[in-house]
Image: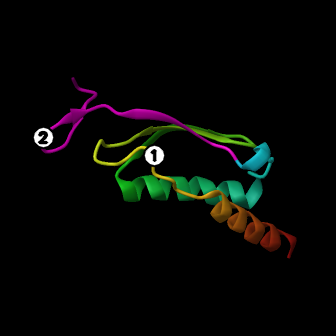
Amino acid sequence: MDNYRSLTHSRYDCKYHVVFVPNFRKKALFGKIRQYLTSAFYELARQKGCEILSGHMEGDHVQMCIEIPPKLRQGVKILSPTEFSDFYKKQKERHRS
């Protein structure tokens, strides 16, 4: 029982395998975007009280094993497709200049 964490009225060990994929598996996760997403994922996890146990980022997807407390819903959307698209366009413009 050493692996379990606890809240006020419960003990838990909730680990999830999460995969993020851009539209059409577009190979867009390189350079500055990759650096930004790495720090953004860790910052979001810290803010939500989660812990990223392991992760791997390829050019067309991100895989992570995350420990999430049961008080959070698992189906929460972090970035909608339009938000990611806007972010990608801004990063692309910055990269060109």
Q: Nearer the viewer, residue 56 or 83?
A: 83
The residue shown at (87%, 71%) is: 96
Magenta span covers which residues? 1-21
Question: Which dot, 1 or 2, sits closer to the camera?
Answer: 1
Q: Is residue 2 left or right of residue 66?
A: left
Quarter in which the N terminus is drawn = top left
The residue shown at (77%, 68%) is: 89
Which residue position is annotated with label 2? Answer: 9
Q: Nearer the viewer, residue 15 or 96?
A: 15
Q: Position of residue 71 (x, y in %)?
A: 28, 47
* Circle 1 SS class: loop
Q: Residue 13, relative to residue 48: is it above or below?
A: above
In the picture, the disc for residue 75 is: 1
Q: Residue 54, relative to residue 49: is it above or below?
A: above
Q: Position of residue 54 (x, y in %)?
A: 52, 36
* Circle 2 SS class: loop
Q: Amino acid at mark 2?
A: His
Residue 69 falls inside the magenta stretch: no
